[in-house]
């Protein structure tokens, strides 16, 4: 830089009266400081409630299955009933094998853990729906509620309702609708 030639300053041509003409903003909107980033609805709360109900149904189903697993009479009843229902199938297909007690107990044990896992994901998805965070985990929770089945397929019904409402409230998670028209 040449120190002998002074550089023109941006403020040289500025006059004090020009400050009055500047728009400082906020004069008309001084009453409301709320900025809405996205349209807010009650659909996430409704979906979270549906997912919460599905989680409780799954939890109740797991408790019922655990009660069946720990009662020897119920296991024996399931064994007899299964052999009656599947008797014709086993004699025709596999040479007369029958269901044994260990198979019934192992199936019940696996079903308890499966229902508990689905219940945990449904509860976790419900929390994320309330917070309007982590859309992918919400979808996992809805899917877990649907595949968890539950008593009388109630968790499947409530999981499907939650999934439908979650799809409708996608913008509230900050996800823009993409134009998929090619």
Image (tube, rainbow, N blue to C red):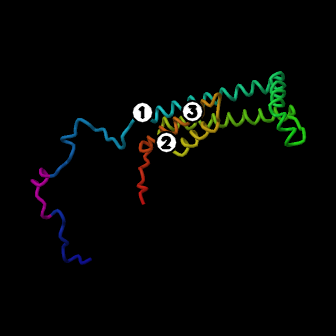
Q: Nearer the viewer, mark 3 or mark 1?
A: 3
> Which secondary structure, mark 2?
loop
Left or right of 173 in this view: 19: left
- Specify few, some or many for label 3: CA neighbours under 10 Å numbering under 14, 14-19, or 20 or more: some
Rendered image quadrant of residue 102: top right
> Which secondary structure, mark 3?
helix
Which residue is painted at 62% across and 28% down in the image? 57
Which residue is painted at 36% across and 40% down in the image? 39
Comparing 89 with 27, the one in front is 89
Q: Quick one: quadrant of the N terminus?
A: bottom left
The circle drawn on residue 42 is 1
Q: Which residue is mark 2?
A: 133
Comparing 100 with 19, the one in front is 100
Q: Compute the Cα span from label 2 to label 1.
A: 15 Å
Which residue is painted at 68% across and 34% down in the image? 115
Q: Counting residues from the N terminus, which is met first, the one under dot 2 or under dot 1? A: 1
**Taking 140 as reference, is 54 above or below it?**
above
- Specify few, some or many for label 2: CA neighbours under 10 Å numbering under 14, 14-19, or 20 or more: some
Locate residue 24, reporting x and y percent: 19, 48
Q: Counting residues from the N terminus, which is met first, the one under dot 3 or under dot 2? A: 2
Locate residue 14, reporting x and y percent: 13, 60
User: Residues in magenta?
Assistant: 12-21
Q: Which residue is mark 3?
A: 157
Rendered image quadrant of residue 73: top right
Q: Quick one: quadrant of the C terminus?
A: bottom left
Locate residue 125, reporting x and y percent: 55, 38
> Which secondary structure, mark 1?
loop
Most common SS among magenta residues: helix
Q: Is residue 1 magenta?
A: no
């Amino acid at each position: 830089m040449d120190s002998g030639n002074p550089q023109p300053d941006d403020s040289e041509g500025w006059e004090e009266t020009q400050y009055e003409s500047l728009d400082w903003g906020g004069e008309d909107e001084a009453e409301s400081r709320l900025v809405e980033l996205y349209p807010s609805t009650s659909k996430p709360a409704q979906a979270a409630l549906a997912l919460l109900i599905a989680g409780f149904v799954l939890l109740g189903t797991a408790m019922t299955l655990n009660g069946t697993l720990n009662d020897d009479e119920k296991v024996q009843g399931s064994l007899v009933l299964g052999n009656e229902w599947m008797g014709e199938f086993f004699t025709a297909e596999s040479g007369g094998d029958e269901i044994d007690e260990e198979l019934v107990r192992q199936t019940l044990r696996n079903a308890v853990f499966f229902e508990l896992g689905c219940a945990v994901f449904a509860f976790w998805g419900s929390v994320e729906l309330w917070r309007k965070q982590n859309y992918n985990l919400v979808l996992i929770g809805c899917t877990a509620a649907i595949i968890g089945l539950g008593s009388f397929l109630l968790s499947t019904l409530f999981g499907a309702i939650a999934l439908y409402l979650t799809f409708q409230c996608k913008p509230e998670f900050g996800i823009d609708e993409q134009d998929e028209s090619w």
